[in-house]
Image (cartoon, grey):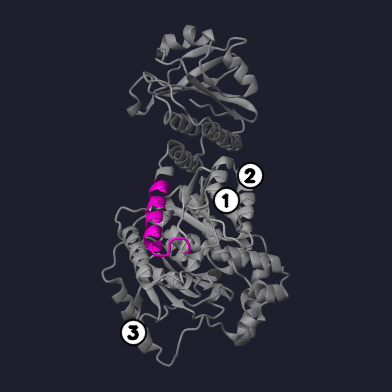
């Protein structure tokens, strides 16, 4: 019987992760006022997708990816038209008659899946249904090459790439996030549609998952029809998922202990599913990656992290671990990596294997925090983990060590993990990382040099009380916009100061313009006392920041920042330097566009 739920309570990202984590097979149908889409899963992995949007057609995707030409597409469509009812799927026609390579076809199908997920992520309201174990493909699917029949995509990788693309489209204005109007009794309305269409097409026994649904047919000519599968739908209940996982993974646990764990996980699920102020995973800048072969622990930690609104990805594959880390960093996430307890005589998860993999990740990604889980009785491994540089070692219960209290111990562990992970993501550095991510997203939207300069000033002002942009001219600097100097910081950008400051030889500014390196500390340069502080006043603490912005290998601005009346504090200089580096690239693009538009003019920052 199909399962159903509402996107308002369970975002599509969470639905897809649940299907992956429980290794379900079937077809996920998603209905929203913004469109309709289907994802087909095999053992938790996505194997195909379709979408009602005119943009998401395999022909269009291959055309946009320059895998085929317009002439190739027209030729294939004409061949299909002439073949009539004997026509093959569009992608098979392109492969056989138009020179489409197998690799390009495979990539096109992957892109179709990815972009279908991207579109669905923005749907805030609607209905999803999951037809478990119903994947009935039509005979025409056999015409496809074996390589394409075996198309499966790592669900977690698809999600991470889709979330990154979604963010980019939102910030580029290609996707508008807005709450869709509430539908009164949405399930009843869908059932009414199903009953009506059943009457109209009563001679049809059942909708099959044909090559059309699999995204492999002539999507340019698909006639959209609403499937009539809504009779007798069973409402989605998280407790059923928890019960299934526990029954499959904790075979030796007594029934009473299983019920304790099911009730605990269900209470967590209801909290994050029913919370009115909980944000979807789309807007989060936090991620946890769990590396363990323990299926129950994977599922339990996913549930805990979801309650905190944290993106969580689990894997027992060493190769997938690197891919997950790379993709989270590409999305401007700073993940926490959690290693499960060693499992003796299990390849890849013995103590020595865990230590080896953990050491490699520490060397590859020194900026990532690592948490190690370990048996409370294995103190030597715990001490070794801390000595190796892990952030923390958390004791996780083993049934073989405390059978009578395993359920209580596991609940205590999960509660502690939730509190600890919450604290990790509320630390100053991680908050700054979140600000960096949001500012980088905003930077992508800017097209004019003055706007980019203001974005730099705004970002730096998040860590300092007073900030000032100095435009570098030939022999002097021009004091431009500021925050917290002329007026209170809360009032935002102040009018340009127009103060001109000579660049003295052997001054810190002269050296910085030549080297392009930033400065954070207490300067001894007399320029400040003689020329700058006489105009803006000296800060209480002499510690300042000078951050150059380079464009086309030339320093064009220097941002001055201090702590005003406050004492100096630690800053994330690497974040600041990285952001200004990205701003420099954006500035180059802006000035280049300006030069193309006005070849005889240059654009200043005034």
What are the residue bounds of the magenta stretch?
A: 400-422
Whether residue 97 appears in magenta in the rendering, the answer is no
Is residue 190 left or right of 317 when viewed as pictured? left
Tag of residue 364: 2
- Which quarter of the rendered picture does the N terminus lie within? bottom left
Which-is-in-front pick, marks 1 and 3? 1
Tag of residue 523: none
Name which of mark 1 and mark 2 comes first in the sequence.
1
Is residue 384 left or right of 189 when viewed as pictured? right
Which-is-in-front pick, marks 2 and 3? 2
Residue in the picture at 47% in, 8% down: 529
Secondary structure of the residue carrying numbered label 3: helix
Whether residue 407 appears in magenta in the rendering, the answer is yes
Of residue 257 and residue 532, the one placed in the foreground of this image is 257
Q: State the CA–CA distance, disc 2 to disc 3.
A: 57 Å
Q: Which residue is the site of mark 1?
A: 325
Residue in the picture at 60% in, 86% down: 139
x%, y% of residue 576?
A: 52, 32
Name which of mark 2 and mark 3 comes first in the sequence.
3
């Amino acid at each position: 019987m199909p399962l159903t739920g509402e996107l308002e309570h369970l975002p599509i990202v969470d639905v897809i992760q649940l299907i992956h984590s429980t290794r379900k097979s079937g077809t996920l149908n998603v209905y929203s006022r913004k469109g309709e889409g289907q994802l087909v899963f095999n053992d938790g992995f996505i194997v195909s997708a379709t979408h009602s949007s005119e943009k998401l057609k395999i022909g269009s995707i291959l055309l946009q990816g320059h895998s085929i030409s317009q002439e190739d597409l027209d030729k294939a469509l004409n061949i299909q038209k002439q073949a009539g009812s004997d026509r093959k799927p569009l992608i098979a026609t392109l492969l056989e008659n138009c020179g489409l390579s197998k690799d390009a076809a495979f990539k096109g199908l992957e892109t179709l899946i990815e972009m279908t997920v991207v579109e669905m992520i923005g749907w805030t309201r609607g209905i999803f249904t999951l037809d478990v174990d119903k994947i009935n493909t039509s005979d025409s699917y056999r015409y496809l090459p074996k390589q394409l029949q075996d198309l499966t995509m790592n669900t977690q990788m698809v999600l991470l790439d889709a979330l990154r693309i979604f963010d980019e489209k939102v910030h580029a204005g290609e996707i508008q996030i807005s709450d869709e109007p509430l539908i009164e009794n949405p399930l009843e309305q869908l059932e009414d549609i199903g009953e009506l269409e059943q009457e109209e097409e009563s001679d049809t026994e059942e909708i099959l998952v044909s090559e059309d649904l699999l995204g492999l047919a002539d999507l340019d000519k698909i006639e959209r029809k609403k499937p009539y599968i809504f009779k007798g739908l069973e409402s989605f209940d998280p407790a059923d998922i928890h019960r299934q996982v526990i029954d499959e993974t904790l075979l030796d646990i007594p029934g009473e202990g299983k019920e304790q764990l099911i009730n605990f996980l269900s209470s967590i699920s209801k909290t994050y599913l029913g919370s009115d102020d909980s944000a979807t995973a789309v807007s989060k800048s936090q991620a946890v990656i769990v590396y363990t072969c323990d299926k129950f622990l994977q599922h339990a930690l996913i549930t805990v992290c979801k309650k905190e609104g944290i993106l969580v990805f689990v894997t027992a594959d060493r190769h997938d671990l690197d891919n997950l880390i790379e993709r989270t960093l590409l999305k401007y996430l700073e993940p926490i990596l959690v290693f499960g307890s060693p499992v003796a005589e299990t390849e890849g998860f013995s103590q020595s294997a865990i230590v080896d993999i953990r050491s490699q990740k520490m060397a590859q990604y020194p900026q990532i925090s690592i948490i190690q889980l370990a048996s409370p009785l294995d103190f030597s491994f715990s001490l070794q983990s801390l000595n190796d540089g892990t952030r923390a070692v958390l004791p996780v219960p083993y049934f073989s060590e405390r059978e009578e209290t395993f359920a209580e111990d596991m609940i205590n562990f999960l509660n502690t993990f939730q509190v600890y992970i919450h604290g990790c993501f509320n630390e100053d550095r991680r908050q700054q990382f979140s600000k960096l991510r949001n500012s980088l997203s905003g930077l992508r939207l800017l097209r004019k040099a003055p706007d980019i300069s203001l974005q730099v000033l705004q970002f730096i002002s998040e860590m300092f009380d007073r900030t000032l942009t100095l435009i570098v001219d030939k022999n002097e600097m021009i004091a431009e916009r500021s925050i917290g100097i002329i007026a209170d910081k809360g009032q935002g950008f102040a009018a340009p100061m127009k103060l001109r400051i000579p660049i003295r030889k052997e001054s810190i500014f002269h050296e910085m313009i030549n080297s392009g390196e930033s400065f954070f500390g207490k300067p001894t340069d007399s320029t400040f006392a003689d020329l700058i502080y006489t105009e803006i006043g000296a800060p209480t603490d002499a510690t300042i920041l000078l951050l150059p912005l380079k464009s086309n290998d030339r320093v064009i601005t220097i941002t001055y920042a201090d702590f005003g009346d406050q004492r100096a504090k630690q800053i994330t200089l690497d974040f600041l330097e990285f952001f200004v580096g990205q701003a420099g690239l954006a500035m180059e693009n802006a000035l280049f566009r300006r030069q193309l538009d006005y070849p005889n003019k240059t654009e200043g920052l005034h």
